[in-house]
Image (cartoon, coloured by chain):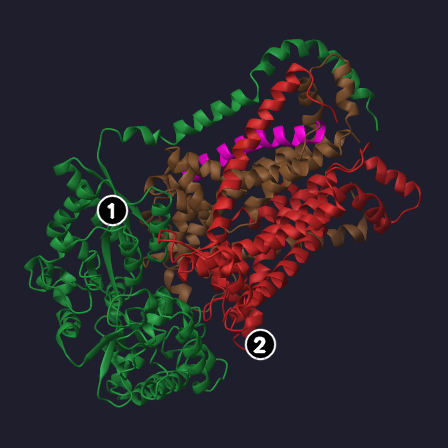
Chain colours: A red, B green, C brown
Amino acid sequence: MQGFRTRSDKALKWAFIASLSIILLLILVPVFHAIQLSLFQSESFISNKNWVGLANYIRILNDVVFWRSLWVGLVFGLLTIGLQVFLGIIFALFLDRSFPGLPIIRGIVILPYLLPTVVVALAFQWMLDGTLGLLTIWAEQLGFGRPSWFENSYLAMTVVIISSVWTWTPFVTVSFLAALQTIPKSLYESAKVDGAGLWSQFWHVTIPMILPMLMVIILLRSIWMFNKFDIVWLLTKGGPSSATEHLPILAYRRAFLQYDVGGGAAVATLSFLILSVLILIYFYYFPLEDKESSN
Amino acid sequence: MENHKELDVLTMQANEANQDKKIQKFGRREILKSAIAGAALFAGGAPAVHAQQKTIRFLNAEPSRDSVKALRVAAAEYERISKVKVIIDTVIPDDAYNKLQASIAAGTPYDIGTLAFAGHVFILADAGKLVPLNKLVSKHKWGPRILFPINGQNYWYPYDYNFCWMYYRKDLYEQKGLKVPTTWEQMAENAKALTGDGKFGVAQPLGNNAAAQWMSLGYMWADGVKLLDDNFSLVVDNPTNKPKVMAYLDFMKKLSPSMPQGMTQALFGTVLSQYSSGQVAHAPYAGRLMEVIEDKAPDLVAKTGFFMYPDSAGKGQAVNHGYDGWVVLNTPMKDESLKFMEWFTENQYINFLHSAPLHFQPPRLDVYDDARWRAHPLVEKHANLVEFMKSFLTRKDVIIRSVDTEGPRVDLRPAKMFETFAITEALQNVVYNGMPSSEAADIMAKKYRTVL
Amino acid sequence: MKIKGGVFLFTLVTIALLGIWSFFPIYWMIVSSIRPERDLFKIPTFWPETIDWQFTSYKNLLELTDYPLQFMNSVVVALAVVFITLIISIIIAYVVTRYRVPGKTFIVGSMLYAYMFPPLMLAIPLLSIFATLGLSDSLIAVILAHCTLTIPLGVWMLWGFFKVMPFDLEEAAMVDGCSRAGAFFRVVLPLSLPGMITVSIFSFLLSWTDYVFAFVLITSDSNKTLPVGLASLIGSFDARWGELMAGATLIAIPLFLMFVFLGRYFIKGLAAGAIKG
């Protein structure tokens, strides 16, 4: 670490400040605007606003709907993140080899992530269509009767989780692959020489080397999945009877459909605060400024 | 780590580094600036051009290709004669209101917009964002319950009714010796008789969405159920209405074995598909269904009949309300927008309606007598359907209702009630969760109360 | 790294399963788009019984939408986003890891805020900002909006890469007469190439698949991107499953091909990164 001494340092410094300012402007201004909306009561984004201070928060926190949505969000988030990371690591490990056809396989593996969410939702809706869906028919042929994928709370949640895992595991896989490739083979060699088996190599060589990357991935995926709106909305709109209605959907409903912009913004802000707490905890255990890491 | 190899390479290249310094001067900021400039070129340098020409931005919520075409043709024609450019932006109906309010909130409002809910018109008018269209509206006579005046002013110009009624397969009725139902009981029996062999009697969407609230409530309205009284107080759970609501919920439960799977996911398009592919024998819809089967399943056209939602006793009938219209926004271009709307509603209204000749049921009474409108092949061919549709406007014994138009005048409260989907939840509770209809009705009333 | 016998077989089977898991829904999507329409209403079979060589679904689709135009828009926006993201992420990540910067945690943490709010709520004030700059309804607005999604990701990922890279290498290079920038290009860049490529890929995809920002910020049909186009197709009544699947396929296939080709460079990049071993 050093200060900005030379001329090229200074140029870099200005470039840094400029870039940062633009980005923070584009991010923070909308965020503050959204938070500020939660302190007013308004029926739309253009109606007259009445200042209500924290009244929206009190109302929302007293509403059982909020807590249920929070619970749904946690269940959805934890399950999807867990599965994505778990499967992502496994897939990456298997792809970290060389065999013929590797580019094709890698292309196939990342394919789910390439699709816009609306396409994924369509594909799954088509496969799960009540009468014509392939999976519906297979389930029937396998003796499960015609499953009501979207009428049953548990099934609906499962569908949403599986489609999310299908779509976003490639993110984990590819990030991991990149990280795995940076581990010098020599480390594995020395481990083998010391008599370590596959599992031991994984645990003592792979994991420590990719731990920073792993933690970043977990953090990012957590934030994203907790806030994932599109896929759930497109598949179930939060149904059946709010079984899959998590905080983003509740916020959307309130603000854009139920003429309660302040309430929706409050839900969004509360969700934001919860995430902030999690991030702070994360920073506590994995600070950005750790003791100078010389390898 | 083995670094030596790299260092050698670096040493060799160090001499070139000095030369490279010149190139480094063309640093990141420069690149950034040219990137943005390049992107600007790509975006077509749009902002600058407007200086010369007047432009009106029109938000259209009819995405079918014929409707879009009709609007684009009209826009081109208007530009030719007035030199004012009309830019059409098309979104799906569900997104129209949000797009409109986003554009206003951001300070870049559309000049003309399309809305499908009176509540949305109310909000915009209340916030002073709309321009009154009294002059335009008063030029013609209109059908019932289609103008939604707010404080005596008309802020919206309707372009269609979309009443929902029931279509049925005449051939299957003949096969099974069935008659057009006049009571719920008969309806349930007919549907049951036509269920079997992988086919179903009727499709009634039951999800928490607009499709369900448009297609599945007609039976309840036919029985005379009111949700609100003239003071906007909730009356759905009073002694008159509650038993009817309960009876309706029980009836729907009775009807449900005749419905295909997945009714909580069913949307407008689902029902169209199911009827036109022969999967269901009854389907609730408006004129669009006829247009669709003319296009995709013509052999069904002659086999398709229609009737209104029956009530429980055989005394009344109903259709579910539906409508669309345009609003002019209070923008700097409002005078031009008004001129355009005047021209458009005089000269292009019928053309636009023809893009869905049976689905866009004219709300303006003069259109029905207009030879140009009648000249459309589908309007001619389906004269009996058109008569049927027109009769709703004049018959006193047909109830026209919807959740969002309850109450004596347009107001936000019924709109909020619509968005709670309390009635569809009640339907789900009774049909799928085995809840007794009394309990479901109470929950529904309680939910409605929270928004009143 | 070749493996022998049973392990090889096990790996092969697992990879096959992985391929099936990833590809099956897409296979089904493609197959549905080339079935004649009537077949779509019958009980489906695994292999299509008949293939509609007329590709009617595709023809209908192209009639109903401005697909080529939207495709171009999506491509242009995505490429611009990748370019800008790389440059800005590199600057920010590099400076944060190599220099003393006050409030590092706050800076990097606050960029995450973009992910923590519903995009639709952020899109409206963003539209306002862009409108004041005269950029409403332009692809530039969409590009910048996407950058708010991609740059935090880019910074985080590259920060991870730069952080584990010891400073000694650059020091050695500078001792040998390289400028700071020279050291960056000669030492840091090659070693973190996998990271850069990863960031590029993700930025491209985040931009390509975004619906919300493109929906709010664009108001004329000629500037629409693919996801917006497909969504409006779903809402219209002219389309059925066949056309929808055709639209979905058309979005997926070019990407797949692109990735198969880019994948080679990806591997090269990854391999180059492994040289230092």
Report the amino acid beneath label 2: Phe
In the image, is residue B287 part of the stretch drawn in magenta?
A: no
Instruction: Say which quadrant the C terminus of chain C sits in.
Output: top right
Q: Secondary structure at mark 1?
A: loop
- Chain letter for the residue marked with disc 2 in the picture: A
Residue at 38% x, 72% y is B205
Q: Which mark is residue B319?
A: none
Residue C92 image position (x, y, % from top left): 62, 31
Q: Secondary structure at mark 2?
A: helix
Quadrant in which residue B393 is drawn: bottom left
Q: Which residue is mark 1?
A: B330
Residue C177 image position (x, y, % from top left): 74, 12
Report the amino acid beneath label 1: Asn
Depth check, mark 1 against mark 2: the one in front is 1
Of all residues, the one furthest to the right in this rendering is: A194
Tell me how far mark 1 sits from mark 2, CA to CA: 58 Å
Residue C242 image position (x, y, % from top left): 40, 57
**Taking A57 as reference, is C136 above or below it?**
above
Residue stretch rendered in magenta on the structure: C72-99
**Taking B422 as reference, is C214 above or below it?**
above
Q: What's the magenta bit mostly, secondary-structure-wise? A: helix
Q: Which mark is residue A144?
A: 2
